[in-house]
Amino acid sequence: MKAIRLFLLWMPIIIFLTGCWNRVEINDIAIVTAIGVDLSENEKLQLSLQVAVPSKLGTSGAVAEGSKEKSTFVISETGSTISEAYRNIQGKLSRPIFFAQSRILLIGEDLARKRGVSHLIDFHTRYAEPRINSYIMFTKGKAFKLMNSLPKFESISSEEMKELAEQNFGLKIYIRDFLNMLLTDGLEPVAPQLTLKSLEVNKNSKAGEKLAVNGVAIFKNDKLIGWMDENETWGLLWLRNEVIKEVITISIPEEKGGGKISMEIARADVKTVPSLKNGNVKMEINVISELTIIENDSQLNLFDTKTIEDIQIYVNHEIENRIQMVVDKVQNKYQSDIFGFGQSIYKKYPKEWNADYKKNWEQNFSEMEVTILSDAYIRRIGLIK
């Protein structure tokens, strides 16, 4: 009896002391830090993997002191599918490829326009290792080129891409978000555009190029159909209710002294309200924001209540115009509901959506009346009169 009790006591301990039976040592694998996909010259998929070199990294992830060698290298191969290209790359590496640490999927424009991206998303969701919480980005050129760029602040370029995505100055889309947009009626996919920008020290000299998030890729179904620039992205972020770090600058009329006033958005809330009357659907966008004045280049007295009310009117016009500009462009040029207006209609009028609007939503979206209403409130003006 005593022996049985001892066995029952020690059995759980023995189980938990068995160790990690399926562990993988870091020196035995090729760690992928970023994945890039392009369309090759022979119309095949070109898969590029940025692979870390652990011996060239310091303990904190920085480049090892005194090392002149890169902490990553990029290897590329083609195939009729991602899986085939991946196997072709594996044949060139002495270590098994490990995707689980990759946080970036970067896709070139030619591939996204001609063949779409659903097959790439399919690989990420079916294969066990790649993360669906990786960031997805697109570039007007070749993904391969950007993956070979030299980082300015981080040890590897993929880490710089990730940090750019997390800065909240632009659109931030995970692979799982992109998949959700593909599968949702009344909502078309969008994703950030990654590019290389020249760093100018002065007019006569440059300090090379740096990675930057610079606009948005617009899709219809799974194919890329166009781009938005940085200013237009601002309006899209408002419509997606994702404005976090943004500065609004307004120009004061000359008759009131001229100059400019810059404000930082402290809080913003956007509500999309669809309405249906006599078979016609309309969309009203209500924008409520709170702002803090951070710079005043005008002669206005900000301690005067009437002056603040006038500035709020200027801000409302600025917000409404910039959002309306984006809505007009997308409705007229792309006819792609990247705002999710159709999804809002479905939630409020599911029967009408399924019966009347879903089938011909592209045309209905482009013809729909959209009204933008902004209510901006200046909460803080600073201490200087």
Image: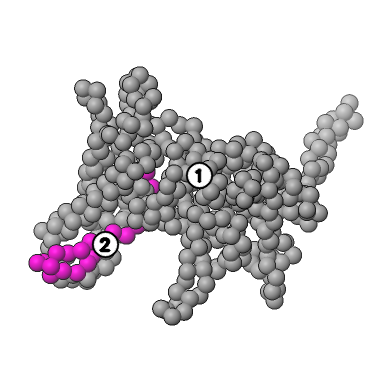
- Residues 78 and 308: in front is 78
Residue lying furthest front: 42
Q: Quadrant of the C terminus?
A: bottom left
Residue 9 in view: yes
- Residues 43 and 301: in front is 43
Give the amino acid at mark 1.
Arg
Residue 103 in view: no
| Mark count | 2
Q: Which mark is residue 249?
A: 2
Tag 1 residue: 113
Residue 246 left/right relative to 207: left
239 above or below 187?
below
How far across and down, in percent of the image, does residue 129 sit?
Answer: 67, 43
Task: Indicate yes or no whether the magenta region holds residue 260.
Answer: yes
Residue 54 left/right relative to 371: right
Q: Quadrant of the N terminus?
A: top right
| Residue at x 57%, y 59% (from the top left corner) | 146
- Residues 97 and 335: in front is 335
Q: CA distance from mark 2 to mark 1?
A: 36 Å
Q: Residues within 10 Å of mark 2 (few under 14, many from 20)?
A: some
How far across and down, in percent of the image, does residue 379 sit?
Answer: 24, 56
| Residue at x 33%, y 31% (from the top left corner) | 363
- Give the extent of the magenta segment: 239-261
| Residue at x 68%, y 54% (from the top left corner) | 76
Name the element at disc 2. strand
153 above or below 280?
below
Name the element at disc 1. helix
| Residue at x 24%, y 26% (from the top left corner) | 280
Task: Indicate yes or no whether the magenta region holds residue 81.
Answer: no
Give the amino acid at mark 2.
Thr
